[in-house]
């Protein structure tokens, strides 16, 4: 079934007002019409069964539909990448199940700032990837931070993706942690000093195997691998 992501402000009672972009998508792209059923994902509230009642309007079922929660809360600290490849990080990471994206400035980062327009583009991509993957929540995208501003993981695991680290399966604990903080460096990787700083703060260096993955793919791949280990 078609799913769309909506802000809470679009809802009044069980009535939903669709945006112009959503109207175009439903009517002209997906060829939906009045009476057709859809799913509506309201941010921070849940997923509802609904049906279209006319152009620009939908009627919600009053009770959220049951959803399957992800096995752990994954937070990705990802260095900014050239040519806005961070957008690919958001798209693939959202589909994989990452809950928080934190853009990071490191010593080898080529891009070192985030414009408001770029931030808005990432949010739009996250919404679209949420719809496509039918995941139970919309991820958050945080403001830019430096590696020095990062704190040690207060709950669960802190992992640095590093080809020279321990194999991922050996590094993770058997029981599913409440949270996982992943760190992925830029195209040239973290410097030895940055790696040592994170190790001192309680992170563990882990490898995803003998292959070297692109920086924009590594976080999503790691998340899928972790969930595969922990899913019951």
Image (tube, grey):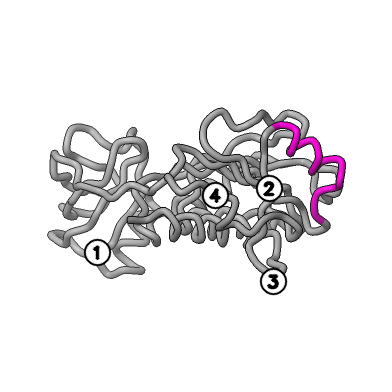
How dense is the environment of label 4, judged by Cα within 10 Å: few (below 14), some, or many (20 and up)? many
Residue positioned 67% across, 29% down in the render: 151
Residue at image location 13% in from the left, 59% down from the top: 35
| First in sequence: mark 3 vs mark 4 | 4
Task: Tell me: residue 43, above or below residue 168.
Answer: above
- Crowd around label 2: few <14 · some 14–19 · many ≥20 (10 Å): many
Marked residue nearer the N-terminal end (1 or 4) = 1
Q: Is residue 154 left or right of residue 45?
A: right
Q: Is residue 225 above or below residue 122?
A: below
Quadrant position of the N terminus in the picture: bottom left
Q: Real-space Cα distance between discs 1 and 4?
A: 36 Å
Q: Position of residue 182 (x, y in %)?
A: 61, 46
Q: Name which of mark 2 and mark 4 comes first in the sequence.
A: 2
Q: Which residues are magenta?
A: 189-201
Residue linked to disc 2: 160
* Image x and y of residue 142, in percent: 59, 36
Q: Residue at x 24, y 42 (%)?
A: 16
Query: Which mark is on residue 172?
Result: 4
Q: Is residue 226 magenta?
A: no
Q: Which residue is mark 1?
A: 1
Label 2 residue SS: strand
Cβ–Cβ under 8 Å for marks 1 and 3: no
Closer to the chain start, of discs 2 and 3, is: 2
User: What is the distance, in whole Å, between disc 3 and disc 4 at their CAs?
Assistant: 19 Å
Q: Around disc 3, counting alpha carbons within 10 Å, would you say few (fewer than 14), some (14 to 19), or many (20 or more)?
A: few
Q: Secondary structure at mark 1?
A: loop
Q: Earlier in the sequence, mark 1 or mark 3?
A: 1
Calculate the distance from the C-alpha at mark 2 to the C-alpha at mark 1: 38 Å
**Is residue 199 inside the magenta stretch?**
yes
Of residues 142 and 221, which is closer to you in this image?
221
Residue plotted at (53% across, 46% down): 123
């Amino acid at each position: 079934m078609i799913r769309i992501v909506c802000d809470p402000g679009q809802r009044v009672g069980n009535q939903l007002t669709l945006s112009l972009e959503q109207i175009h998508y439903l009517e002209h792209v997906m060829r939906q019409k009045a009476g057709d059923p859809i799913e509506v994902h309201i941010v921070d509230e849940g997923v509802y069964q609904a049906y279209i009642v006319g152009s620009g309007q939908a009627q919600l079922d009053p009770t959220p539909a049951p959803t399957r929660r992800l096995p752990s809360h994954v937070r990705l600290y990802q260095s900014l990448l050239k040519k806005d490849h961070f957008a690919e990080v958001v798209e693939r990471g959202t589909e994989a199940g990452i809950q928080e994206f934190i853009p990071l400035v490191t010593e080898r980062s080529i891009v070192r700032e985030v414009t408001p327009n770029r931030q808005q583009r990432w949010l739009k991509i996250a919404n679209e990837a949420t719809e496509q993957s039918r995941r139970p929540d919309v991820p958050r995208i945080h403001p830019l931070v430096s590696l020095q501003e990062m704190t040690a993981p207060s709950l669960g695991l802190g992992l640095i993706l590093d080809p020279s680290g321990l194999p991922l399966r050996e590094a993770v604990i058997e029981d599913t942690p409440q949270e996982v903080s992943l760190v992925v460096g830029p195209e040239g990787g973290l410097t030895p000093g940055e790696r040592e700083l994170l190790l001192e703060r309680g992170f563990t260096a882990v490898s995803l195997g003998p292959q070297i993955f692109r920086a924009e793919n590594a976080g999503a791949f790691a998340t899928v691998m972790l969930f595969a280990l922990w899913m019951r």
